Amino acid sequence: MSKFSKAPGGKGQDARSADDFIAAANNLPATESYPWIGQDDKKRRSGFNMRFTDAELQKLKFISENTPHSMHEFCIRVLTPAIAAKIAELTQQKG
């Protein structure tokens, strides 16, 4: 006949007191932080290469040749508001 070293149904290591449970209810979760918060927004860094079809690349070159904007500047001007709008949409969904 085997003997058990612990009685079943006893308090284990993970058991929390009622006071601990009630006190934890007042702890609100931390405000969500996003990876771009606090990042340098002044210096451009190479993030990734964009892949264009030949037709898309020729269209960008055409824009560049017929406006005062480079292909890079044009893409940044178009992408920046689109990125901001998508971030606003995604962060509102979480809130």
Image (spheres, grey):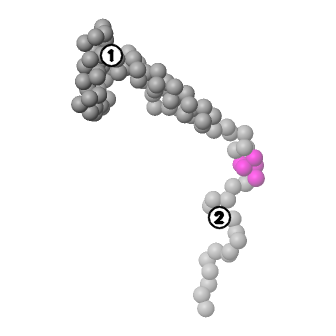
Image quadrant occupied by the C terminus = top right
Of residues 65 and 22, the one nearer the viewer is 65
Residue at image location 35% in from the left, 21% down from the top:
75
Magenta region, main secondary structure: helix
For this view, does 91 lie left or right of residue 78?
Answer: right
Secondary structure beneath dot 2 equals loop
Question: Which residue position holds label 1?
Answer: 73
Label 2 Cα crowd, 10 Å radius (few <14 / some 14-19 / many 20+) = few
Q: In which image quadrant can residue 65 be found?
A: top left
Asked if residue 17 lies in the magenta stretch, the reply is no
Image position of 95 with respect to 22: above or below: above
Range covered by the magenta-colored residues: 18-22
How far across and down, in percent of the image, does residue 32 sit?
A: 56, 34
Q: In which image quadrant can residue 3 be found?
A: bottom right
Image position of 18 with respect to 66: above or below: below
- Which label sits in the foreground, 2 or 1? 1
Q: Residue furthest top?
A: 68
Question: Which residue position holds label 2?
Answer: 12
The answer to whether residue 51 is visible is yes
How far across and down, in percent of the image, does residue 54 sit?
A: 23, 31
Per the model, the C-alpha gap separating discs 2 and 1 is: 63 Å
Image position of 10 with respect to 53: above or below: below
How far across and down, in percent of the image, does residue 41 sit?
A: 41, 18
